[in-house]
Amino acid sequence: MLALAVGLVGAAGATAQAAPINPVTPQSSCGLGYVVQDQDPIRHAQTGALLGTVYLLYNPMVGYGCTVTVKSAYVGALTRTQVYLAAQYLPTQVDDGNRLYAAGPTRAYVKGGCVIWGGFMADPTGTIHYHERANPAIGGIGTCF
């Protein structure tokens, strides 16, 4: 009976070590008033496993757009993560580096204009994986406000 109880405790302890939950959300990263306009998953090129998601948010009160790449895999581990926002007539905003939870936010004034946005994640081997709708001709997704 004692062996059964110890076995159950051991099994319960094993399931308690699930993958870490990412504390970062697009809204917590960009701030109050920002609403998700679009999102695009980043999947492992070979396995199809979800690695993260690139988000485009907009704050209609101030006319600013915001992008963030939130990790779904390798959460809490330093892996290269990138996000960018290229607003019409403005310099491209980029956040790229080894991140625990997310890259970004990047912000730019976008009201009445168009943007190109996107990002990527690297796995622990350094292989880069792009978001699904990454357009090779322009590098990202085009959106107009």
Image: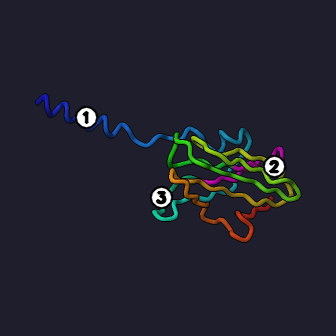
Residue at image position (74%, 67%) is: 138
Q: Please, is residue 58 above or below residue 49 in the view?
A: above
> Where's the N terminus, which quadrant?
top left
Residue 49 circle label: 3
Cα–Cα span, label 3 and label 2 = 31 Å
Which structural element holds mark 3? Answer: loop
Residue at image position (71%, 50%) is: 67
Label 2 is placed on what type of residue? Ala
141 displayed left or right of 46: right
Check the image and name the residue furthest to the left.
1
Residue 108 circle label: 2
* Magenta-tinted stretch: 53-67
**Label 3 vs 1, first from the N-terminus:** 1
**Crowd rating for badge 1 (residues with CA inside 10 Å; few <14, some 14–19, many 20+):** few
Q: Please, is residue 112 above or below residue 7 in the view?
A: below
**Crowd rating for badge 3 (residues with CA inside 10 Å; few <14, some 14–19, many 20+):** few
Residue labelled with disc 1 = 10
Q: Position of residue 114 (x, y in %)?
A: 81, 61
Q: Please, is residue 11 above or below residue 52 in the view?
A: above
**Crowd rating for badge 2 (residues with CA inside 10 Å; few <14, some 14–19, many 20+):** many
**Label 3 vs 2, first from the N-terminus:** 3
Residue 56 falls inside the magenta stretch: yes
Q: How many marks?
A: 3
Q: Position of residue 139 (x, y in %)?
A: 71, 64
Report the magenta stretch's main SS.
strand
Label 1 is placed on what type of residue? Gly
> Where's the C terminus, which quadrant?
bottom right
